[in-house]
Amino acid sequence: MFTYDRAVLFGAAAAVRLFLFTAFPSLPNLLAGRVEVSTPVTSFKRLQEGLFLYSHNVSPYDGGVYHQAPLLLPLFSLLPNPSYHPLATNLLFIVVDLLSAYALVQIASSGQASVTRFFKSTRKDLRWTNTAIAAGFLFNPFTFLTCLARSTSTLSNLFILTAMAKACQGASVTFLLALSFASYLSMHPIILFPPLLVLLYDARAMRTKSTANPVAFTAIHTVALAGMIGALLGVSALLTDSWDFLASTYGVRLLLPDLTPNVGLWWYFFTEMFDSFREFFLGVFWLHVVSYVPGLTIRLRKQPLFVAVTMIGIFSIFIPYPSIADAGLYLSLIPLFNHLFPHMRYTFFALANTMYASFLGPAFYHLWIYAGSGNANFFYAITLVWSLGLSIIVGDSVYAALRDELDVERPDLRDKEVIRI
Amino acid sequence: MALISSLLALRRDARVQKLPPYLSALLVIVGVAWLFALPLDSYSRRTYVSENALLPAQVHTYFGGSEHNIFRAYRHEVAALADSSVADRSKKLADIFRESNLKVASQKYTYSAANRTIDNENVYAILQGPRADATEAIVLMAAWKNMDNDINYSGVALALSMARYFKKWSLWSKDIIILIPGDSTSGSQAWVDAYHDAHDPETIQSLPIKSGALQGAVAVDYPAGPWGHRYDKLHIVYDGTNGQLPNLDLFNTAVNIAGGQMGIASTLQRMWSHSDSYRDRLQTIFRSMVSQGLGHATGPHSAFIPYHVDAITLKTVGDGYHDEMGLGRTVESIFRSLNNLLEHLHQSFFFYLLLEAKRFVSIGTYLPSAMLIAASFSIMAIAKWVESGRPSSVPNPASTKPPPKASDSKAKDKPTEGTKKTDAKEPAPSKQASSDSKQPKTEKEEKEKEDSSTTTTLQSGSSKSIIPKAFTSIVSRPFFFPLALVLAVHLSGLVPLIAFNHFPDTELLALFRTASNLIIMVPIFCAFAIRWSTNMDVARPTPQENNLIQCFSLLFLGMLLSTLATINFSLAFFVGLACAPLSFVRESSDYITTGILYGGLAVINPLAVAHLAMKVGGVEILDVLVKASEGWHVWGMWTQVVVWLVWWPAWNVAAFVVALGFF
């Protein structure tokens, strides 16, 4: 599994990260304070606050600052205090990134992106090497910044990628474990369960050449996932001696009480809103995110991995507290579908748009917060552009996937222009 | 949707593909012409005070009478300090403040830049407003030495007497801080950094006493000696570090009070005589853009602006009939206005270009000019991207060689843009064609077939046309090498950036000369190295890679400049203008063209342009380099970053691509 070039790549990625951590010791703190990188539910600074309270035997959720999962606390309290001895923490985040890249390599080498149980893309030979895909993740500037900011979304990204990798390999138990950890850490990955379950089912069917009863299969896995998440929550309750953490972690993600700006679309909308409409629109916004799952899973039944990746793209736009970590995860998964690139029509435009937004965003935030010469609308306008760029990539890739299916169904239509009426 | 796809189909039109260079050039021309339209009456507006709490010139001023005698006495006291040491001077100034029953403190600071040490001391006093709760403060400044390095005798004396005078009033609802910085730029920088706890306590003392949030700052620059000097006008200086400007309301208030209440004319940007003609207005715009683009500190007020404290400097200029009491009353009235503020100045513009004291252009009107120039790079980047996706050799469609049969049987329907709708409505012909064609064989065979056919047939309705496949196919782009090269060049800009900011002053001139020569050689050397290190059979980088290199470089340039334009319009405009020719150069196989292009590029390299600008501006190279180093270490100026990490890489990549023609 570990070839020479892959070892070089992983070594280089770790070395560059370690170099930046040690050469610029103030960089992680600077990045951890940037709203584009750290959100209230992933920020390392808030984690430190939670750790401080936890190590002083106060409930970490008392201050109203810490909104992350309770199990992170014992993990990080084992490490030396990052304010004085940051090396161990930095190494942890580097290892997490490398493991994520390794999971991505596993996804790529399973080939589920272009050849699934019911579907074989006409351009399936058009693919990047696994190492190139891993490089796209490890040297993606967004992944890089997230790792340097030590945002805990790197951990949930690791579990999401591992869940996808294990689903591709048809490994039920590890898949369920990874997905339950991902959902436990950041809640929204549970939405990935339906497409990933389909992927798991197909992968197992391909591997064992026999099909399990779909109803029983779904029931067993759903119960098992519920059990695992229940166990994690139970351990958390034991750890903090109360169930209060539910309101401070998942409650915050669901109900958006912290309106710190981020790259998403929710914060501005909810600052402007009258309180009486809040609950209604919270429902509408969440329903909107979830509503993509059944549609995409049913329509793209033959390409479940693509559905999961598209859902990750949708998360990076529409969840309440998105950051560049989510966009980085999505943009690193897209190269798995190199066979769809010839069908995509706006790649350059969308990527240039995303790059423009990633430069203009910090500039406008500076004008708003530091220079005082701009206002909230400046930054919000750029988050709209950013989301536009990402949604163009999402929309365009879905078009490409459908076009690819059409090529298989109707080989005579290959290379012809398709017009939506 | 149909509209979008027909627009997309336009990409393939040969005429459209020829368009971008002209469009790009047009945008640059329009961008520059735009600037020349700004001084016209129809594009500029008269200034107005937007914040109604300010009420400028609505109060009677009482600074006069016996205060005049006190002022003259202080002026002699200050003049007596001219030759004393920094410590003695600080002690004396502190004593004077203390006599007025103010809280006094001093702050020592040491900066070192380019091997020169700036070592001085600030003295300041806090007047606690009788109606204030120490949450807000306004600052009156008089630097010991002004920007021309003259001792600010009358300015300091005025600050001292204003402090004594202000203390008598019971109407202050904000604290007033009277600050005497040791020099005009570093002193106020050290003080304002320490006020916001953003200083390095090793070299800059922390402030022992503080007040609330700063709401505004006014500096007085009046270097007349102990016997006074009657001035003609007030020169209002408003540029902050990195081209950030104070709220226009503060400037308007000063102009309004000086002109309306005191009858003192105001001027700006060293326009000592301003006839309000088109020419003078344009010159004012140009000077303010140069000052903003350089991003240097222009007075003691400059350090305040990055902290979102609106600040201006009032400098007396010329020979006239206005005396120190007029200036004192102007300051008094400005402080009465600032005292009225209910919230931070926010109503009026933060981005503006002033044409004269009472006319301005707002950002909405002038920003398009820099944005158009930045957009010209993006357009060329898109054009280069499209070009890189096309095969390099297009077969002659009029060739007498008959097209292979395979293409006929396959009947590729690629509707042209004009007939798309009809085609969409009647899918019958294409279906028929597909049913006629044989079942697809294995994919490999089909691929081979495709490759062998160089033309494709377009069919719409009953008409057919045969066009070379090269026009419609997209080849894959090897973008790793170009992207890595462009990023490497951008990163290598760190080397000169660090060198220029850390060399001692004795070496700076030599460094500049060496860099000026090296900068021209580097692209040739890189081009040689890359040609030499890669296989000569397939000359790398290939024309396609060249296109991509230029595409990424121009994309970055356009992106960075449009970002910069929102922060520092003038710098983005000037750098954009200097980079405009970079869109139009390309590799040429013939030595003469390459030589001419390279010579042209060598003339517009960043250091040559900077050298020329210094010659025209009549400033010494060394002074500029030392100031730049000081700006980097003391003021937090990042003009150099733009030069070395945006401008130079863009130039270097373009020069590299041209230099490839030599080898």
Image: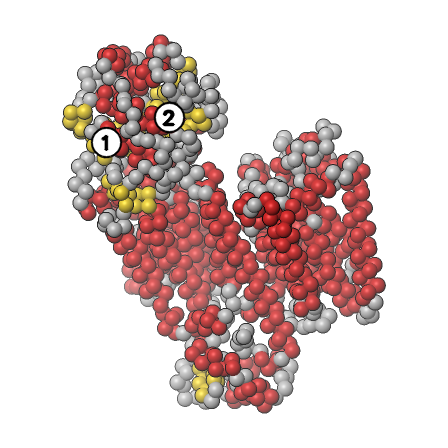
Chain under callout 1: B
Whole-number angstrom distance, CA of label 1 to CA of label 2:
19 Å
Farthest residue to the left: give it.
B320
Residue type marked 1? Gly
- Residue A292 sits above or below residue B399 on the image: above
Tell which of A82 and B661 is nearer to you.
A82
| Number of residues whose C-alpha sits closer than 10 Å to that of mark 2, classed few (under 14), some (14–19) or many (20 or more) | many
**Image x and y of residue B542, in percent:** 45, 65
Chain under callout 2: B
Residue, disc 2? B339
Residue type marked 2? Asn
Residue drawn at x 55%, y 61% is A393
Where disc 1 sits, the SS reads helix
- Residue A338 sits above or below residue B566 on the image: below
Could one spot residue A257 in this view of the protein? yes
Tell which of A336 and B596 is nearer to you.
A336
